[in-house]
Amino acid sequence: MRNPVVMKNLVVLLFISIILVSHVNGQGEIKLNQVGFYPDSPKIAIVPAGVDGLFRVVDAESGEMVYEAHLAEPLYWEFSGEDVSIADFSELTMPGRYRLEHPAAGSSYDFEISDEIFRELSKASIKAFYFNRASTELKEEHAGIRARPKGHPDEVVYIHESAASPERPEGTVISSPKGWYDAGDYNKYAVNSGISTYTLLAAYEHYPEYYQNLSLNIPESGSEMPDLLHEIRWNLDWLLTAQDPYDGGVYHKVTTKNFSGVVMPHETDEDRFAVMKSTGGTLNFAAVMAAAARVYDKYDPVFAVKAIAAAKRAWEWALHNPEQYYVQPSDIRTGAYGDRNLSDEFDWAAAELYITTRNDTYWHARNFHEINVGVPSWSYVRPLAWISLAHHRDNLTDAADISLIEQRITEQGDEFLEEFQRSAYGITLGRYDRDFVWGSNGVIGNHSLMLLQAYRVTHNEMYLNAARANMDYILGRNATGYSFVTGFGSKPPMFPHHRQSAADRNTDPVPGFVIGGPQPGQQDDCEYPSDLPATTFLDHWCSYSTNEVAINWNAPLVYLVGAIEHFSNK
Ligand code: G3I
Ligand code: 9MR
């Protein structure tokens, strides 16, 4: 190519396309919370390393520069295989709409700084539970374009062979309506209900003034009892029906034999079964009912009495059947939630019963001096005991050791802080095998739940800021560039593994759900773009191992955004 004019034109064209491409791609290259920040929050973005160190924040409308600073020294993040630099613009506190720009990395998505930045997210994350209600029609006045007929009435549920007892032989019909669908599927599992319901109860118990007037536009809205408590009741009412009235044991799940197709709730008519009473399910029930008894006492004392009685019966059953581990029957293929270590379930149930009844027998039933904390999950609930003990530490009997409780909570918080300070992304996910697992977004949510307990005990802002940072990860400051919450941020998941979202006629999925999140297991049949822990993710229906939604991942999201809202406006 000798012609200088053609050459020159080509060079100009090439230059223009580089600028265009880098601008468009740039929106994915700079990773930040796509929703935004409270004025007093730390604010950081992640920029790919290797270029000049100056970045700037500009007003989204005028393009005018409002802040300029140097990137931090690059760090390597092994989980995504990237060298990245932190752009810290915490000093910018003026409410407004902005974007971050960097000469090589391009522009970020727009974000906001506002006093109410998580308000809508807080409501939507709870409303997601309403959208997952079984046994009810969702009316247009509450559900808008997500209105749908009633599905899964569950007034005819068959006792499965594995659950047969003298009083309720196989095939007996019981009524077990209401409750939330567990996830993208339509089944109801006592174990996973336990941690999910508890986490929502804890949100209310810890921040009642925040939830007092948070209106969710659900059918029960407008009564004296706050909406969050109404939403939780929907599931507690189901859980109560899952207890065998003859002996106090709790069915592990109410389920179809197989996962249903990609259909709306009312389009299914497969038989539903109550499957095997399990020690795990029963202890989850005992813990949640004991906690519910104290939380509902003010608004519904009759229910509170019923709940604590049910909790005690469940506890007694578990003491007599301590090793009835769930075993999936050969004709049942839905979620197992199997767990063969139930010492943590015993600890948690004992703690909740102790707190609510103030009966020392429950405290002495377990050896709290010997047990540690850790990260809550559906199979590891011991930390929930510490959360409740810490919240009630000033009102316990003399049997309890308050300094031990405070120490356990802060030790756990410190463990996360160490990871947070070392992390190239400025978050607390940092262990291959334990953090990047199925539901990694639930893991980081639960890290934050524990960090917030450390903050509540010590008032040290470091813990609160680490929890806020983890929230930034969920909303876009992660290696995939997605905001992981449906309906929130510039690039949210559009195709979650959620039957209702996939089967309705709407383009957008049901909002307010956090998807499971990246993890390298690849337990489904999708083709992933990566094998690395932090980038193995696909926004596709096929990806139930990274892109499903679930109540136990949404519950810490609810707690986290509610708590951050609450603390940011104090
Ligand atoms: O416990 C091991 C750990 O020791 C190991 O280091 C790690 C390495 O990957 O794996 C851990 O086990 C994983 C286990 O979850 C605990 O995290 C399994 O690999 C993983 O397959 C298992 O995934 C569970 C999944 O069901 C499959 O059973 C998820 O925790 C659980 O959240 C998910 O729950 C499903 C329900 O069954 C059905 N409803 C939807 C719901 C959400 O996807
Ligand atoms: O849809 C199911 C999802 O809720 C579960 O978490 C997941 C793992 O148990 O299984 C999904 O169902 C899949 C089934 O296991 C295998 N065939 C494809 C189903 C999804 O389309």
Image (cartoon, grey):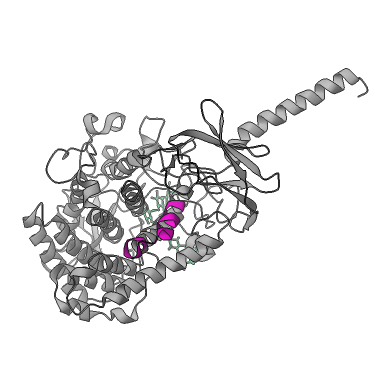
Going by the image, does 554 lie left or right of 465? left
Q: Position of residue 9 (x, y in %)?
A: 81, 20
Q: Position of residue 137 (x, y in %)?
A: 21, 36
Between 282 and 64, the residue placed more toward the observer is 64
Residue 149 vertical position relative to residue 385 in the rendered view, above or below: above
Q: Position of residue 102 (x, y in %)?
A: 63, 38
Farthest residue to the right: give it.
2
Residue 413 figure quarter: bottom left
Residue 248 is one of the magenta-drawn residues:
no
Residue 65 vertical position relative to residue 191 in the rendered view, above or below: above
Residue 52 figure quarter: top right
Residue 324 visible? The answer is no
Between 462 and 337, the residue placed more toward the observer is 462
Q: Position of residue 81 (x, y in %)?
A: 64, 55
Please provide the residue range marked out in magenta: 455-469
Residue 428 visible? The answer is yes
Residue 145 vertical position relative to residue 78 in the rendered view, above or below: above
Residue 468 is one of the magenta-drawn residues:
yes
At 52% from the left and 49% from the top, the residue drawn is 525
Going by the image, does 433 lie left or right of 22? left
Q: How many marks?
A: 0
Q: Quadrant of the N terminus?
A: top right
Residue 364 figure quarter: bottom left
Farthest residue to the left: give it.
302
At 31% from the left and 81% from the top, the residue drawn is 369
At 20% from the left and 46% from the top, the residue drawn is 212
Characterize the magenta stretch by its predominant secondary structure.
helix
